[in-house]
Image (cartoon, helix red, strand yellow):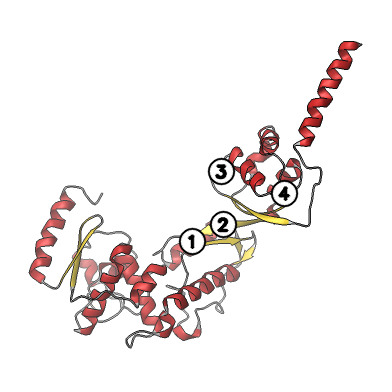
Amino acid sequence: MLSLFVFTFGANSIHNTFLLNDYIDTSSSQKIDILIESGDTGTKIAEKLYKSGVIKASKVFYKLAINQKRSNSISPGIHEIDLKISAKAALDQLLDPKRNRGVFGFIEGLRKNEIFDMLKKSNLVSGNLSASVKPDEIYKTSNLEGFLFPAQYSFAPGTSTDTAVNQMIQRFNLAAKTSKIDQGFNGFSPFELVTIASIIQAEGDPQDFTKIARVIYNRLKIKMPLQMNTTVEYAANLRGKIRLPYKQLEVNSRYNTYKYQGLPIGPIGNPGQEALNASVNPESGDWIYFITVKPQDTRFTNSYSQFNIWANEFRNNEKAGLFK
């Protein structure tokens, strides 16, 4: 009888200790957003819940989670979770799809069709995009290319496609206001500046954006064809070609800046903040040519002979496999 009492007392002590490290409530009027990222471990999730004030002790949630297979179904996203609740209640809420605003994001320079494809595959949105979703009136276009701002967004599952895309456009409008491209620059309209920014984004690395902008403006000023490979890639629906076949340079498209002088008829991708900034802040210089001779080494000149010397260096580096 004594041994039974000792065991019972010991079990109760353990149970009480466990409870002291766990809240009793299963809900609360106070809530907080918890970001669960792809690859987060059980330990990481427990730490986030504890540091955010959701649970009383991370170890209690962790022990609960590892003993329940359903914890493997916790999805990445921004979860709205009540504060100061039990570990079990926290797990229940993390598994509630109604509390999860999924995270959707994309990088600078992606094209409209690539973004829409990613959005569709995310399973966060529903419905088709309506014709009423378009850029601000100052851009005088209904084409969304260039106006889907690269950033992280949070969408609740079932968000309409219109709502999701409108968020991207509104985020673009903030970036446009920050850079002041919405005010125009040196006679170029806001729409033309988005087009220029999209070329800048596609043509180089951020450290070279302002120089690339200057090359574009210098060529336009002397009525020299822009001859940007990235515009031809867009016209031909290609990606990442270091060198384009001559036949591609003849593609009959108003996006082909080898065939048609001046700017293409619209953006060739969706630029980020740095490219938008560069479009209205070109660096001072007389450059007309630029070439990337090796990764992270782009050079600028106004001399065609110097350009050809660097072009030979580029070809040698290409043969050596530096661009693989």
Q: Position of residue 121 (x, y in %)?
A: 53, 56
Q: Secondary structure at mark 4?
A: helix
Give the Cα distance between marks 4 and 1: 30 Å
Q: Residues within 10 Å of mark 4 (few under 14, many from 20)?
A: many
Q: Nearer the viewer, mark 3 or mark 1?
A: 3
Q: Position of residue 60 (x, y in %)?
A: 70, 36
Screen quadrant of the N terminus: top right
Residue that carries the numbered disc 4 in the rendered image? 93
Q: Secondary structure at mark 3?
A: loop
Which circle's residue, 3 or 4, is located before the other in the chain? 3
Amino acid type at mark 2: Val
Residue that carries the numbered disc 1 in the rendered image? 117
Q: Is residue 166 visible?
A: yes
Labels 2 & 3 near each other (Cβ < 8 A): no
Q: Residues within 10 Å of mark 3 (few under 14, many from 20)?
A: some
Give the Cα distance between marks 2 and 3: 14 Å
For the point 34% across and 75% down, the residue is: 279
Q: Nearer the viewer, mark 4 or mark 1?
A: 4
Residue that carries the numbered disc 3 in the rendered image? 40
